[in-house]
Amino acid sequence: MSVPRVPATSPLPTLDAATVEKVLVTFLREELRAANVDKAVLGLSGGIDSAVVAFLAAEALGADHVTGVLMPAETSNPDSLTDARAVAEASDVVVTIVGFPSDLRQVILGGDGVLAGTKSGNIIVDMTTSEPSLAVEIAELARRIKPLILLGGYSAYPRTIDFARMSEIAKSVKAYLLADIAHIAGLVVADLHPSPVGLADVITSTTHKTLRGPRGGIILSDETYGAALGRALFPGIQGGPLMHIIAAKAVSFSEALKPDFRHYQRQVIKNAKVLAEDLSEYGFDLVSGGTDNHLILIDLTEKGMTGFEAERVLGKAGIFVNKNTIPFDKRSPRETSGLRMGTPALTTRGMKQKEMKTIAELIRRVLEKPNNEKNLQNVRSLVLQLCDQFPIYGYLQEKNK
């Protein structure tokens, strides 16, 4: 099987075609052959990678056409469109690249998901709806599409994920469930968020974010898929092990087993809820109306400000957040209509609800007068004072006094 290679000079995709091929061929070969290629892969994450996955699934089964959907970031990036065309031109399989949101012939899951497959319906699932309604919509979508893999995991979802319900949906259509818990792993370990263990066939996660370890990742599965995953990873895509990262992971896992870690995660959630409540009281529109976990997503549409502008001006005042798309965002991913922020780092420094109220007030002051330089400098001064009260590695400073 010939595998198309995306130009090495491009920053996308994060997974190259050879990597995806190994996962597909070693992990799902027999299942793919037994499946209908017109309903290849359903995922709650997307971009050029999904197009490559769908292409490889189609080519492996001898199909002659596959459609890939590009998410907003790829749609607005000419380089990624070039990559997608390169994938298509490198094979005899016809690859149709459909942009978002100008063409909704494909299934789009909220603002954070994509279906890579063929002959899909015209369905949109609103990720801001209540969990029961969302589950019903996803179940209906899965029933119609009959995916091989159902992926659950989000990068800007402030609510609880019902992995038990997702497992039921996956089993109802004989699909694999892959749960990505990169953002909520720390909450899961602390029993403050439902765990996918025992429900998902494969679980992936980073070891930073709420798990508070080094930059890296983990893949969890039982022995059913362990050997196949191991072969796909090494020597397939993994080079020499980074022993310092492995050691740091061990330290973070050890910390996560201690009672203090659960107390920390509880405080993370408490802080996020107070920050969300105060921001809401100040008139900020929160996607889904609040938060159940460690993060908050603000919709700035009614403020007449882009996420890019808000991120930049808050940064000038010493408050670092990131611009983020919102569901059905009408702005490009370079501008966005949203802001994403979280409380793990603040909580690690020792900040609690009182400080969250202060931070909400400082955010309000900045975004109400974004062009007032004196205001920005005053807020920056207050930010520095707050940080001085909660120094990084403060215990080392005390020890060395």
Image: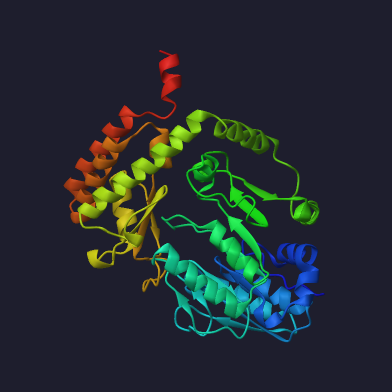
Residue at 63 percent across and 78 percent down: it is 117
Q: In the rendered image of this protein, does residue 245 appear above or below residue 334?
A: above
The quadrant where residue 148 appears: bottom right
Colouring scheme applied when the structure was drawn: rainbow
Residue extending farthest top: 401
Residue at 35 percent across and 45 percent down: it is 272
Q: Position of residue 324 (x, y in %)?
A: 40, 60
The quadrant where residue 89 appears: bottom right
Q: Position of residue 219 (x, y in %)?
A: 67, 50
Q: In the rendered image of this protein, does residue 139 appear above or below residue 273?
A: below
The C terminus: image quadrant: top left
Q: Position of residue 388 (x, y in %)?
A: 32, 29
In the image, 289: left or right of 56?
left
Residue at 56 percent across and 68 percent down: it is 46
Q: Nearer the viewer, residue 127 or 207?
A: 127
**Does residue 68 show up?**
no
The N terminus: image quadrant: bottom right
**Does residue 130 show up?**
yes
Q: Nearer the viewer, residue 400 or 151?
A: 151
Residue at 50 percent across and 49 percent down: it is 184
Q: In the rendered image of this protein, does residue 100 appear above or below residue 166?
A: below
In the image, 16: left or right of 398?
right
The quadrant where residue 57 appears: bottom right
Q: Position of residue 353 (x, y in %)?
A: 30, 37
